[in-house]
Image: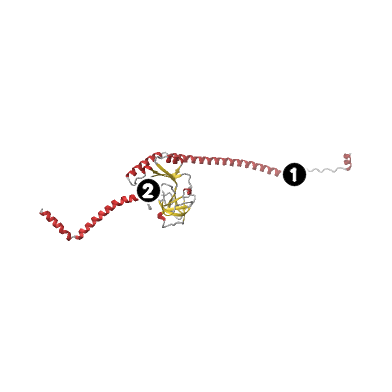
Amino acid sequence: MIKRKTYWKDLIQSFPGSKGRFLSILTLMMLGSLALVGLKVTSPNMEATANAYLTTAQTLDLAVMSNYGLDQEDQEELKQTEGAEVEFGYLTDVSMDNGQDAIRLYSKPERISTFQLREGRLPQSDQEIALASHLQGQYSVGQEIRFKEKEGGHSSLKDHTFTITGFVDSAEILSQRDMGYAGSGSGTLTAYGVILPSQFDQKVYNIARLKYQDLAGLNAFSVAYEEKSKQDQEELEQALSDNGKARLQVLKKEGQESLDKGQETLNKDETNLQEGKRRLAVAQARIQAQESQLALFPKLRESRPVLNLPKPSRNWARKRTN
């Protein structure tokens, strides 16, 4: 008991002699506690803010993309996806006309993954574009911008010069630094833009955005959302598992038909060429024959004998008249 009293007495007496050390330790403990509380509170707040943004933009739950496009059969099959709303669109990767910076152009969506306006307005007519908001320092509303596509390939755009109408944010590309791979320019995506669907010169859509009813209302960062979205993805992949092969067969068939038509045209041209050569040879033979006849004509005139007959007498002429 005496030892315990002595211990507490020494402990209490040590505080006045080391106020600086005591305050330092106390401050560090307070800062650590505040940091821990801040981390605990900040993470849910950040998730709530991000989830609210994704909800406002009606961000897609799943997307189906194809380099060869989604034909009519693919579209019909996707429309039959149970419990999901589907919206089709276009996209293409181009590069700035004045450099190698790659930019992805999206067709303006109507319902799913809509772009959030930050300045100006969204495009309303052809040759108008809204750019990513982080390009505001480089471009301004009303300025013209020109893009270029890969040389030697099919042009995906009807026009390549656009007027900037505004700046937007995309719920599909949240980072401004690491935007992913691009199929044009330097190969690294640096920005994005949105234009009208009518500006794309493509026969088929190349992206389908899906929004599921069973995921509506769930926090996009929750475990429940992750599990259900994974299940929906597996079902969708299973439903579309044979579409790639079917699409390849269609493309091969179309390519073979094009080759057959080209070969048929080539064969006809070859036949016409041979017929033309034959007719030309016949015509040349006739011309040579006529030239030979014309060459012989003067010789015939020179070799014809000339007979000098005597003039008839008057008496003989009278007899003839009698």
Q: Is residue 294 visible?
A: yes
Task: In the rendered structure, find residue 232 and report the number of the disc placed on it.
Answer: none
The correct choice, above or below, for 311 with respect to 146 in the image is above
The answer to which quarter of the image holds residue 76 is top left
The correct choice, above or below, for 304 with respect to 22 in the image is above
The answer to which quarter of the image holds residue 216 is top left
1 to the left or right of 22: left
Instruction: Report the residue at 11% width, 54% height from top.
Output: 3
Question: 86 or 290, which is in the foreground?
Answer: 86
Task: In the rendered structure, find residue 55 and report the number of the disc placed on it.
Answer: 2
Q: Which x, y percent locates residue 291?
A: 68, 44
**Within 10 Å of the Cα at label 2, are there few (<14), some (14-19), or many (20+) other Cα atoms?**
some
Q: Is residue 152 visible?
A: no
Between disc 1 and disc 2, whose residue precedes?
Answer: 2
What residue is pinned by disc 1? 301
Instruction: Report the residue at 31% width, 50% height from top.
Output: 44
- Amino acid under disc 1: Arg
Residue lying at the far left of the rendered structure: 2
Question: 285 or 273, which is in the foreground?
Answer: 273
Q: Which element carries disc 1, helix, strand or loop?
A: helix
Tally the numbered discs.
2
Q: Which element carries disc 2, helix, strand or loop?
A: helix
The correct choice, above or below, for 149 with respect to 268 in the image is below
- Amino acid under disc 2: Thr
**Within 10 Å of the Cα at label 1, are there few (<14), some (14-19), or many (20+) other Cα atoms?**
few
The colour scheme is: secondary structure
- Disc 1 and disc 2: Cα gap in Å? 108 Å
255 to the left or right of 228: right
Instruction: Report the residue at 62% width, 41% height from top.
Output: 279
Q: Which x, y percent locates residue 49?
A: 34, 51
Name the mark nearer the viewer: 1 or 2. Answer: 2
